[in-house]
Amino acid sequence: MIIDHPLLGPRDAAEFTVLGDASLIDRPDPAAEDAEARFYDYVYLRDNPAGPHRELWWHEQGDRSWLVVTRDTLTHEVLKVELARDVARERGR
Amino acid sequence: MRVAGGLVDRSKAVSFTFDGRRHAGFAGDTLASALLANGVRLMGRSFKYHRPRGVLTAGSEEPNALVTLRSGARAAPNTRATVAELYEGLEARSQNRMGSLRFDLMAGADLMAPLLGAGFYYKTFMWPAAFWEKLYEPMIRQAAGLGRLSGAADPDVYDKGFLHCDVLVIGAGPAGLAAALAAGRAGARVILADEDFRLGGRLNAETLEVDGGAGADWAAGAVAELEALPNVRVMARTTVYGAYDHGVYGALERVTDHLADGGGKARQVLWRVYSKRAVLAAGALERPIAFPDNDRPGVMLAGAVRAYANRWGVAAGKRVAVFTNNDDGWRAAADLAAKGVGIAAIVDSRDIAPLAAPAGVPVVMGGRVVGTRGRLGLKAIRLAGGAEIAADCLAVSGGWSPSVHLTCHQRGRPKWREEIAAFVPEGAPAGMTVAGAAGGALTLTGALREGLAAGAKAAAELGFTGAPGAAPKAEDEACGVSAFWHVAEGAGRAWLDFQNDVTVKDVKQAHAEGFRSVEHMKRYTTLGMATDQGKTANIPALAVMAEISGKTIAETGTTIFRPPYTPVPIAAFAGRARGRGFRPTRLTPSHDWAVEQGAVFVEAGQWLRAQWFPRPGETTWRESVDREVLAVRSGVGVCDVSTLGKIDVQGRDAAEFLNRVYANGFATLAVGRVRYGLMLREDGMVMDDGTAARLAEDHFVVTTTTANAGPVMRHVEFCRQCLWPSLDVQLISVTDQWAQYAVAGPHSRALLEKLVEADISDAAFPFMACADVTVAGVPGRLFRISFSGELAYEVAVPARYGHAMIRAVMAAGEEFGVTPYGTEALSVMRIEKGHPVAAELNGTTTARDLGFGRMVSEKKDSIGAVMSRREGLTREDGFALVGLKPVDRSQGLNAGAHFLEKGAEATMANDLGWMTSVAHSPSLGHSIGLGFVRRGAGRIGDVVRAYDPVRGRDVEVEISSPHFIDPEGERLRG
């Protein structure tokens, strides 16, 4: 598999480690009333879609960027690659 | 028997042995062609029934002629004789026989055939059950099988490599050569790979002409042109075995397999090929027709018989009969007749003769072969109606199946095309174009035209504008076919899968027993599951299944083709990752010094660490370790701690960042001070621990445990980039950049005062202080931290000074009797002090379990803080880390023992916890342990059992504080 790194261009997936669902960016507010329930969902519950899926990949053997890779789990087609920090900022983090 | 012509070099004789008997061939021969030239038809015994078998094909799809090549540690079992290139002195042995190949003592298995049909092992040998493992299975394994491994380590080197290209052309037959020429002339970077040692594909095996000359000559010219192009890489002996995501292909190059002596080069290279476009020109595979006793040596595919005659100048028989359902079979008769070989008959299953037979050859239209004769080699064939025709070779053609395999590796499912009675590719991987016979264009002109177009298109799509050149001119041969799969009449078994001994009857039985989908039929009968993956068997078998079940072939479908296309040795996948290369170890900067000291080493994470330093006269490890511990506790010792993970944390928000990743607070840590840090996972469990030293307002250096250095780095980078991207903080791993040594013991200060150019008195440099210092003339860092519980320091210098540093410490410490100590002494001392390590931080323990519950700050948020407060993790009856002492102090302890109340039955319900770490404490003179006990904090002084059924131990232990030595920590503050 090849991941088109936004800064470094196409790189082999072997250079990366995958963490999983990009929803991990959305860490709940620890001060919220129902923080414990929200954290429970955040830590343990994941969608497992057949089709496009947003995943976190870490360029461990490269520049150590965390990327959000939108990948079709049925075809392995990589639809979009973004720097995770840009995604996190857009989401108000 | 040799006939005129062919592409072998008759000026170069090559001698070889088969089963110990010496034969001669020529350069350019395969083992199969040379054996046939020497009149050897019997080449192997079948997998299950030990039936005598000869070569069926002339290519990598060969199911029968499997041999063991070479001997000793270099022996390569299950090598197909059809692809083994002849070299001087080649040694080959036949397989799966007991006694000689001609008189295999296991041939009786064939008489047992009625018992050994599809699924026999599910039904027979059932009783008594105990016999299966001890008798039946070993017996079956002994009887059935292919070649055996030598059992010796492979002495050859295998390599891996990476290649990049614009256009990968797979197969160098007419379509592949035309594609490579078009793309190469256009200017694209082209890789042309073919499994054969001579490029040209069927052009070398046929008599068809291209551009007015011999096809083989045109192929040689094309190869010469390609090799002269600087942007083209031509790779013979290279099988593209798999199509992977995003234009990545796997290829195996057999670099020196064809040489008597590899000359020290890698035997094979496993290539990962990155391509922007690929042209699949893999050609087609001829398939047999199933008829009774169609497996005798001498029954061959017609295209193979033709290939042996045209390419290798070998007649597979003196009197050849042809059995065909298509026009192609007729060309075998014509080509052989032209070489002067006698043709016994042409038997065609169709009704109308498509072509003229060679003069004087009898033709039987609407004919069927219903039986054969000849135990070790074909003597005669019998036709429907009873006529018998003498023949020592039967050339069979059931039509051609496009080699769609690589188009299926990414979920492509081939589609049936009735007019050519074959499956063609559908849904090839992105970037792949199929050209020539692989796509169903079964004529030479079709192959050349499609190849050229595919190569030109691929280059053009990538922006290469050079002219692809004109299509070569060729004749268009007849290729009519009418599907005919198996002969129903006649006695005897009709073989479909020769390598796994599967017959038409087995498929019928699978259907009768309900295994009707092709995938079920495959697994029940094992059809297509041998090393050839059923290349000649699959399509006829599913056609038979379709017929039995009354479905069309299109409805029946194919099984899924998966990589690799042909077998790839495990050694090639391993490459150089063998022995020490399998798991390389990292060495610290002063490793050589430790070797000089005679250290015994242990793998810790990826590192080799000194475990202890034996001295003359010490006969057990315990003597060395006890001495090292006592030396530290009473004098001074030095330990290499360079392997601990180190992360440099810098930025305006560095303190805030650490405040969020550590459970305890860091915002208030003063510059020049160190603090122990406890890191949780988001689920509230402890992830790792270490220290964070604040070297400046905006600069920390953080340590991790050795094994967790990688995972912690990943975690903190995740926190920085994904959770808090707005914090001004930068992280970098500096584990390799710093050599670090613990100097521990009452004399440690006196020792370091000789080396450090700074005031390190207790007042100036108290416990948990840190500073940049000059040490032994080198800029370094000093930390007053202690893992041993003694007055101790850790001194860090840039890695390149590590070797000099340890020598400087040893020299300065000579007057104090400084003692190097290893990881065992380190471990004993940390158990004596109750410090948790990996055995306690096992991913299921919480800060509360470890007695660090109060460290998880309530005043701030940090990773894991919310979840650590979950009800289940804060139970009253939760675990607590405690110390354990044997009541009878002379007894030893075992890690892994579980705790039970005295007199309680050993059940899960009565389980009180478990022992995590044990050591012999030389300071206390008895064994001690750490462990988790329910409500442990309230049970100090209680006696429980440490029950260890695995090792047969049951020891009474007293629960104590985990801090066995100096519980108030007076020594380390001294």
Image (cartoon, rainbow, N blue to C red):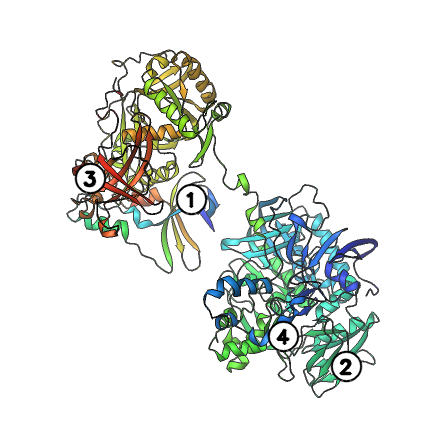
Figure check: B248 above or below A7: below
Neighbour tally class for label 2: few under 14, some 14-19, many 20 plus, Cα within 10 Å:
some
Rendering coords of residue B123 (x, y %): 48, 73
Rendering coords of residue B329 (x, y %): 71, 75
Element carrying mark 2: strand
User: Do marks 3 and 1 both belong to one polypeptide chain?
Assistant: no
Determine the residue located farthest toward the bottom in the rendered image.
Answer: B385
Rendering coords of residue B207 (x, y %): 77, 67
Element carrying mark 4: helix
Rendering coords of residue B478 (x, y %): 71, 75
* Residue at numbered disc 3: B936
User: Do marks 2 and 4 both belong to one polypeptide chain?
Assistant: yes
Which amino acid is tagged 1? Pro
Residue B389 numbered tag: 2
Distance between mark 2 and mark 3 Cα atoms: 92 Å
**Residue occupying the point 43% across, 16% down:** B810
In the rendered structure, the answer to whether residue B429 lies left or right of residue A40 reads right
* Residue at numbered disc 4: B111
Q: Which of B610 and B268 is in front in this view?
A: B610
Q: Which of B186 and B479 is in front in this view?
A: B479
Distance between mark 3 and mark 4 Cα atoms: 71 Å
Figure check: B95 above or below B326: above
